[in-house]
Image (cartoon, helix red, strand yellow):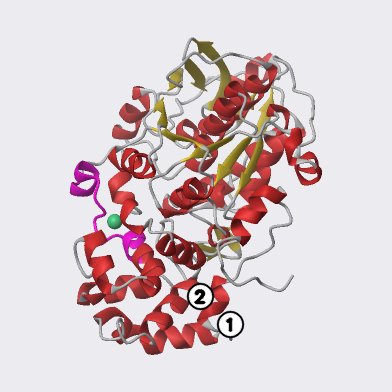
């Protein structure tokens, strides 16, 4: 019997919210019955932890200004406490998770984020997928009332909510498009870097900065050999955004999560593993329901769009040169040229994918200007681009297999691009991949249904001038 992961509580101190967790060798026994106590036996060791060691964590979220508590803000902070725990839990996963009393929506969210949100981590650490989740609810603390999310209000009367919109900005093309489409939206970033600030400056708008500081003990435990990997960071940043919106009286949090994020990265024995789980439609829905009591309408403005359609819109609106869609530029723990200079590296899967989504709508010199090189004219990029439609896509925020092929076909058919090495080398293969779905490349530009969205937001998507899908 190893350690239990205890999701303890949160504490608001001025501008800071402290999230408290614990690895507890006696976790469930204090709740269940003393009859479960450990028998004398050989010591059990969880990775780098000693069998009887209690490890406490205190993560700090600094909102930069005093956070005024209210039942709405508290409900968002509860969600934050639940989802941010994935960063610590993964060191000893899978194990029992002790939580405060949960509403049905919160329970569903924990089941989703501690399995689906950690499946890439599990798969890459040779753990079982789906990752089993065992929740032990404590009887302490109030269980929040189940409040219906407010999309019905929004559909019938968007003015029933406060009209202000908060837009979490990631530095890349998706949130740049959302920010550009909602000119009066308030921009915010969690742990912003130069690239985030550059985008806000380019749009001529202030950036609200929130700082997330992981407990330094986590780094020590990982250095001592604990398992490490990807966590559902979009869920964590979303909960920070909803808490901020609730505190500031903003009625909406508009995300830039696109349709393509729902496609799994790899399927293992019939089980989907998705790097972008917390950006998927399923993840969005779990978060939307859990945020109901906050009174904030959490939604994704770009859900009806593919990455290719977003690329077309970003290029058309002149935003391409202001974005950095490169994950190496945003790594926190690993130092590299891209993270120091805040320029796209030009070699990672995300850089190559982004250049493919933009290129059909730009001239070669614009790609050269953005990345400093002709990314699609390099022999070394042929194999990595082919990987984007393989059965195991790179574990990165890349789009659907078939839309990547569609972009390649568009480039191969365009005389200003067809001579570059990547489209030239892969044209035939891309056509075969696209033939699997029998669709023309232009199909991928179509807008999906906007019926779930408030009318004023749906109108923004319809204004992009992209073809409408038949619904
Ligand atoms: Zn890159």
The residue to which callout 1 is attached is 437
SS type, badge 1: loop
Q: Quadrant of the C terminus?
A: bottom right
- Does residue 247 sit above or below 97 in this rendering? above
Specify whether 374 is left or right of 331.
Answer: left
Give the answer, above or below, for where 301 lies relative to 306.
above
**How many numbered badges does the structure rendering display?**
2
Residue designated by label 2: 402
Examine the rendered structure and indicate whether residue 68 appears above or below residue 103.
Answer: above
Pick whichever of labels 1 and 2 is earlier in the sequence.
2
Asked if one can make out residue 79 in the rendered structure from this viewpoint, the answer is: yes
Q: Which residues are magenta?
A: 336-352
User: What residue is at 50 percent from the left and 43 percent from the top?
Assistant: 183
The N terminus lies in quadrant:
top right
Per the image, label 2 sits on a secondary structure element best described as helix
Q: Which mark is residue 180?
A: none
Is residue 232 visible to us here?
A: no
Is label 2 within 8 A of ligand 1 (CB to nearest ligand atom)?
Answer: no
Q: Is residue 422 left or right of residue 314?
A: left
Q: Position of residue 434 (x, y in %)?
A: 51, 83
Contact, mark 1 vs mark 2 (Cβ under 8 Å): yes
User: x, y (%) of residue 374?
Assistant: 22, 70
Which class describes the residues within 10 Å of circle 1: few (<14), some (14-19), or many (20+)? few
Question: Image point 30% across, 73% down: which residue?
Answer: 363
């Amino acid at each position: 019997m190893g350690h239990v992961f205890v999701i303890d509580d949160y504490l608001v101190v001025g501008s800071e919210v402290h999230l408290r967790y614990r690895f507890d060798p006696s976790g469930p026994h204090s709740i269940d019955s003393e009859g479960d106590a450990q028998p004398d036996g050989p010591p059990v060791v969880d990775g780098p932890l000693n069998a009887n060691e209690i490890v406490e964590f205190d993560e700090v979220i600094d909102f930069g200004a005093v956070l005024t508590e209210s039942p709405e803000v508290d409900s968002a902070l509860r969600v934050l406490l639940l989802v941010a725990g994935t960063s610590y839990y993964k060191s000893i996963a899978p194990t029992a998770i002790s939580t405060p009393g949960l509403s049905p929506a919160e329970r569903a969210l924990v089941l989703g984020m501690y399995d689906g949100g950690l499946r890439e981590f599990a798969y890459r650490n040779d753990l079982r997928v789906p990752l089993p989740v065992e929740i032990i609810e404590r009887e302490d603390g109030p269980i929040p009332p189940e409040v219906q999310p407010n999309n019905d209000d929004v559909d019938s009367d968007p003015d029933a909510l406060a009209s202000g919109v908060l837009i979490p900005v990631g530095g890349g093309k998706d949130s740049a498009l959302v920010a550009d489409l909602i000119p009066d939206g308030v921009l915010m970033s969690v742990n912003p870097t130069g690239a985030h600030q550059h985008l806000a400056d380019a749009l001529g708008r202030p950036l609200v900065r929130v700082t997330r500081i992981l407990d330094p003990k986590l780094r020590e435990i990982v250095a001592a050999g604990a398992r490490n990997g990807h966590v559902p960071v979009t869920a964590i940043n979303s909960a920070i955004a909803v808490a901020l919106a609730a505190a500031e009286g903003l009625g909406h949090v508009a995300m830039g999560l696109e349709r393509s994020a729902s496609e799994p990265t790899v399927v293992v024995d019939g089980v989907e593993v998705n790097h972008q789980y917390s950006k998927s439609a399923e993840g969005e829905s779990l978060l939307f329901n859990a945020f109901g009591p906050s009174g904030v309408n959490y939604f994704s403005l770009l859900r009806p769009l593919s990455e290719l359609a977003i690329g077309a819109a970003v290029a058309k609106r002149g935003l391409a040169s202001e974005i950095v869609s490169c994950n190496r530029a945003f790594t926190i723990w690993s130092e590299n040229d891209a993270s120091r200079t805040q320029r796209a590296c030009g070699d990672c899967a995300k850089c190559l994918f982004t250049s493919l989504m933009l290129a059909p709508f730009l001239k070669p010199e614009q790609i050269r200007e953005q990345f400093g090189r002709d990314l699609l004219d390099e022999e070394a990029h042929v194999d990595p681009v082919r990987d984007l439609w393989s059965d195991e896509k790179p574990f990165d925020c890349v789009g659907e297999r078939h839309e990547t092929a569609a972009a390649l076909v568009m480039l191969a058919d365009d005389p200003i691009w067809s001579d570059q090495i990547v489209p030239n080398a892969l044209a035939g293969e891309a056509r075969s991949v696209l033939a699997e779905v029998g669709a023309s490349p232009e199909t991928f530009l179509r807008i999906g249904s906007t019926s779930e969205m408030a009318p004023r937001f749906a109108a923004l998507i319809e204004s992009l001038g992209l073809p409408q899908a038949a619904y």
